[in-house]
Image (spheres, rainbow, N blue to C red):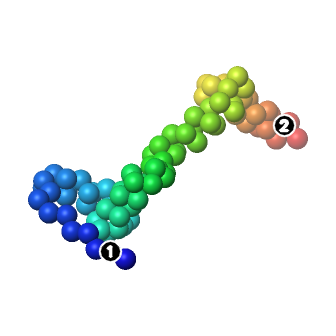
Amino acid sequence: MATLTVRNLDDEVVRALRIRAAEHGRSAEAEHREILRQVLTGNRQPSPRAAAAERLAAFRRRTAGRGSATATELLRESREGRMEDLAGTAGA
């Protein structure tokens, strides 16, 4: 394998690289290799945040129009159920 040395980088670029590497659980050198691989091969993988956003959007598409109950309706149903349980227990 070849070795590549990059000189004269702005401090902000190095800082951003280190932050990005930490977010991905890699060393700055490993992150640099991954960035180069993605850009030069065109094999970009979505970021974890983008992947999560896409999963959420897909979930919303699948569940669109189902008409979920509001929190108020759920609380009302829960209270009615408890009242029925209490009334059944008291009458026994």
Mark 1 vs mark 2: which is more N-terminal?
A: 1
Camera sees residue 13: yes
Q: Quadrant of the C terminus?
A: top right
Q: Quadrant of the N terminus?
A: bottom left
The disc placed on residue 44 is none
Q: Residue at x 69, y 33 (%)?
A: 62
Residue position for label 2: 88
- Compared to residue 82, the image places residue 1 above or below, namely below
Looking at the image, which residue is at 35% across and 64% down?
33
Taking the image as shown, residue 41 lies to the left or right of residue 15, namely right
> Residue 14 occupies which quadrant of the picture?
bottom left
Vertical arrangement, residue 13 with respect to residue 92, above or below: below
Crowd rating for badge 1 (residues with CA inside 10 Å; few <14, some 14–19, many 20+) = few
> Depth check: 66 or 47 in front?
47
Left or right, residue 86 beside residue 12: right
* In this rendering, position of residue 55 left or right of residue 16: right
Residue ranking furthest to the right? 92
Q: Can residue 90 be seen in this snapshot?
A: no
Q: Tell me how far mark 1 sits from mark 2, CA to CA.
A: 79 Å
Residue 34, how many percent across, how many down? Answer: 39, 61
**Badge 1 vs badge 2, beta-carbon distance below 8 Å:** no
Q: Which residue is mark 1?
A: 2
Of the pair 92 and 26, the residue shown nearer to us? 26
Amino acid type of the residue that numbered disc 1 sits on in the rendered structure: Ala
Q: Nearer the viewer, residue 38 or 77?
A: 38
Q: Nearer the viewer, mark 1 or mark 2?
A: 1
Residue 21 at x, y percent in the picture: 32, 61
- State left or right for residue 46 relative to residue 61: left
**Residue farthest toward the bottom in the current orientation of the protein:** 1
The residue that appears at 70% across and 22% down in the rendered structure is 65
SS class of the residue under badge 1?
A: loop
Q: Secondary structure at mark 2?
A: helix
